[in-house]
Image (tube, rainbow, N blue to C red):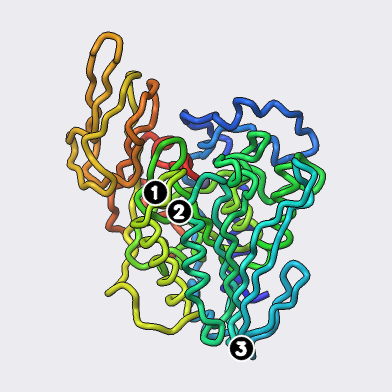
Amino acid sequence: MFRFSSLTLIWMALGVGAALAGELAVGPGDSGADLLEDTTDDAGSRSGDVAAAPEDLIGPPVAAPVTQEPVVPLADAVMAAAGVAGPIEVLGTEVMPGTSHRLAWSATELFEGVPVSTPVLVVNGALPGPTLCLTAAVHGDELNGIEMVRRVMHDLAPSRLSGAVIGIPIVNVQGFRRGSRYLPDRRDLNRYFPGNPDGSAAARIADSFFKNVVSHCDALVDLHTGSFERANLPQIRADLRDPDIVTLTQGFGSMVILHSAPAVGTLRHAATQAGIPAVTLEAGGPSQLELTEVKHGVKGIETLVHTLGMVRKMRLWGEPEPVYYRSSWVRADNGGILLADVSLGSTVRKGDLLGTITDPMNNARTELRSPYSGRIIGMARNQVVMPGFAAFHVGIQTDEAPVEDGVDVSVSEMPTDNDDYVDSMSE
Ligand SMILES: [Zn+2]
C-alpha cells in the first residue's frame, strides 16, 4: 500500500502511551447520551468498554516527542509515487485504473436479520498515487457529509486522477434510515472502531467496515456535523501532534483548523492508530441539509485532492491558508431557555454578549458572555438547557505555526480548563 510517510508508524509507537494516559482523564461533558439505554453486556468487546464512556473522555494535550526528521509533504509524496497505476481490490471487486465503480458493503451483523448494504464509491485514477477515503454519516442523522461525498465523487474524472478516492456516503445506514445518530440499539458506532469480530453488533459492524473498506485508505476524512442541536462552522478537527495529520490539514485551503485529540473508538482514532492519517471535517448541524456548509466542505475536500497532487486544476481558493484555532466552550450556569445573540462565524470580543438564558418559571435572566476575543465556531440552537450545557464554542486564532517539530501548536497557551478546549461533542 502506498504510504505518505513512514513517520506515522514511528509516531504511533512513540505516542500511544501518552495518548492512552491522556484519555483516562474524564471531562465534565454534557452528553452521556450514549449511555442512557446502553446497558447491554458487552464483555467480549474492548471497544464496548470504551464506548461506555461519555463522548468527551479526552485528556489534556500531551506534547509529542520531537523528531529531527523533516516531514514529507503529502504532495511531494504523491509526486514521488513511482510506477504505473494498478488495479485496487475492494470488497472483492477489482477496480482497474481509470475506472469508477459503485460497490456495496454490508456488515455481517444486522439487526433485522436481512442484509442492508450501503454504497462504496471507488474512483481509481489512471495515474499512480495515494488512496484518499471520505466517510460520512457514521452518525446516521448527519446529512451534510452525505451530500459532500456525492458531489466530490461525481466531480472526479478517473482519467485525470492520480491515485484513488473511495467515498462512503452513508456508513451508518441503519441509523440513517431511522433518522438517528445511533445504531438501532442506541449504540454510537463512532465509539466502536476499529471494532471486534466477536463483540457487540456495533463492534462487529465497525470491524467489518474497518477491514473491508478503511484498510484500503492512505488518508481519511471523516465527515460530521454538530450533535444534539448544535451546529459547527465548517472546520477540521485534527490531532496536531502528528506531523502527517498536520500535513493533511494544510491541504484544505482556508479552513478553520482545531486541534483535537480523537476519542478512543472513533473512526479517526482507529484509522490514525492503524497508520492512516485521519481528520474530521465538521460542518453544520444534524438532521438538516445545509447548502452553504455543504459547498464549503466540498471546496475544502476538492482543494485537498488538488493539494495532494491527485488532480491538476486551477487553485480553488486564492492563496489558501489554513487558520489554526484553539478553543473553549462557554457553558450555561443556569437552566432555562437559551436564546443566542450571535450567529455561527460571528467575531466576538472579550465580554461580548453571546446569549441569554431565561428561567421560564421565575423569569430570571442570565447572560452568557465571551471570556475571550475570537470567533464563534460552534453553537447550540435555541433550546431549553440545563446548567453546564455547552452553548457557545469560541475559537481563538493562534498565530503560531502549526507543528513542524511535532510539538503541539498551543499546548502551553490553552485555556487553563483543559476539559473545555477539546470538543468531541460532535464527532
Ligand atoms: Zn458525528
State the quadrant of the N terminus.
bottom right
Q: CA distance from mark 3 to mark 1?
A: 39 Å
- For label 2, the crowd category at 10 Å Cα-Cα, with few meaning under 14, some 14 to 19 and many 20 or more, is many
Amino acid found under the numbered disc labelled 1: Gly
First reached walking from the N terminus: tag 3 or tag 1? 3
Residue 181 visible in rendering:
yes
Which residue is tagged 1? 284
* In front of the other: 349 or 207: 207
State the residue at coordinates (40%, 36%).
420
Question: Residue drawn 47% across and 67% down?
Answer: 151
Q: Amino acid at mark 3?
A: Ala
Q: Secondary structure at mark 1?
A: strand
Q: Are marks 3 and 1 in contact (CB under 8 Å)?
A: no
Q: Is mark 3 within 8 Å of ligand 1?
A: no
Q: Are marks 1 and 2 in contact (CB under 8 Å)?
A: yes
Image coords of residue 179 (percent x, y): 55, 42
**Residue at (23, 39) in percent of width and height:** 342
Q: Residue furthest bottom?
A: 83
**Mark toward the start of the polypeptide (1 vs 2):** 2
Q: Residue at x 53, y 79 (%)?
A: 77
CB within 8 Å, label 3 to label 2: no
Per the rendering, the mark at residue 82 is 3
Between disc 3 and disc 2, the foreground one is 2
- Marks 1 and 2 sit apart, C-alpha to C-alpha, by 7 Å
Instruction: Give percent across and percent down for residue 212.
Output: 73, 62
Q: Is residue 214 left or right of residue 333?
A: right
Residue under numbered circle 2? 144
Front position among marks 3 and 1: 1
Question: Could you say whether the residue bearing mark 3 is in a helix, strand or loop?
Answer: loop
